[in-house]
Image: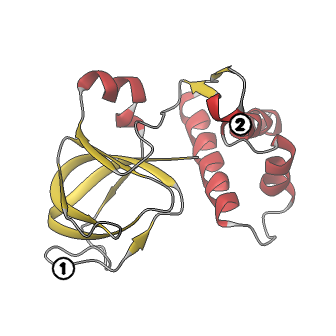
Amino acid sequence: RTHVRLSIIVASLGQYHHASPARLKFHLLLAPSKKMTTRGIKMLILALAMIVYVDGFGALPMPEIGRMGARSSTRLHGFPRAIHKEFTVEKATPEVMESLGVRRWPTWGTEGSDKYKTGIKSPLKYYDVNELSYIIKGKMEITPKETGIPVLVQAGDFVTFPDGFACHWFVIEPVTKHYYLYD
């Protein structure tokens, strides 16, 4: 039963991450000790989180897939989606928060972080995956390497960090955020 459930989760992951379900199953079931790529590790963590979700709630929402031709136009309904493709900060609306399921996303905060201390500019951070964040509380400035111009980010904001984006953080007040990583 667990193997069947895991297969369903792996199939869902394969569709969502545009990876072969067989390859994911290999990583999850047959080769956990093999050297894995960063992407493989992220998929494994997501799969394990989904298993915990299934064990806790008894079901996994299976997305509908709508194809409109090319891979880039494949949309998964029921999963969060990108709001923008470039670094963007904007106020969240209750409707968008609800449609994206923001309150179910993982939470992370700067308190206790060695890298993101209040009042100190962080080392340069490179995003190796797309991230959409919702700032629950706190305030910081994000300074993109490309422009060097600080952008204020605070509670109630959605922040899109695209893959390959480089920036410095300057935490003004400790930040807590919900975040979602996507391809």
User: Left or right of 113: which side holds 71?
Assistant: right
Task: Give how far across and how far down residue 37 sits, in percent.
Answer: 71, 66
Q: Residue at x 42, y 41 (%)?
A: 105
Give the distance between the C-alpha atoms of the residues marked 1 and 2, in whole angstroms.
41 Å
- Disc 1 element: loop
Residue at 82%, 48% (x, y): give it. 25
Against 31, is 159 above or below? above
- Residue drawn at the location 13% of the way across and 76% of the way down: 119
Graded by Cα atoms within 10 Å as few (under 14), some (14 to 19) or many (20 or more), the crowding at tag 1 reads few
User: Can you see residue 65?
Assistant: yes
Residue situated in front as seen by the camera: 47 or 121: 121
Q: Inspect the image, locate mark 2, and give the three-letter code of the amino acid beneath it.
A: Ile
Closest to the observer, 16 or 44: 16
Task: Report whether 26 appears left or right of 181.
Answer: right
181 sits to left or right of 83: right
Where residue 47 appears, as percent x and y from the top left, is: 65, 46
Q: Mark 1 or 2 closer to N-term?
A: 2
Q: Name the residue carrying label 1.
A: 120
Nearer to us of marks 1 and 2 is 1
Q: Against 6, is 111 above or below?
A: below
Disc sitting over residue 9 in the figure:
2
Q: Quadrant of residue 84?
A: top left
Residue at screen point 81% across, 70% down: 34
> What's under tag 1, amino acid-wise?
Ile
Q: Is residue 109 left or right of residue 106?
A: left
- The N terminus is located in which quarter? top right
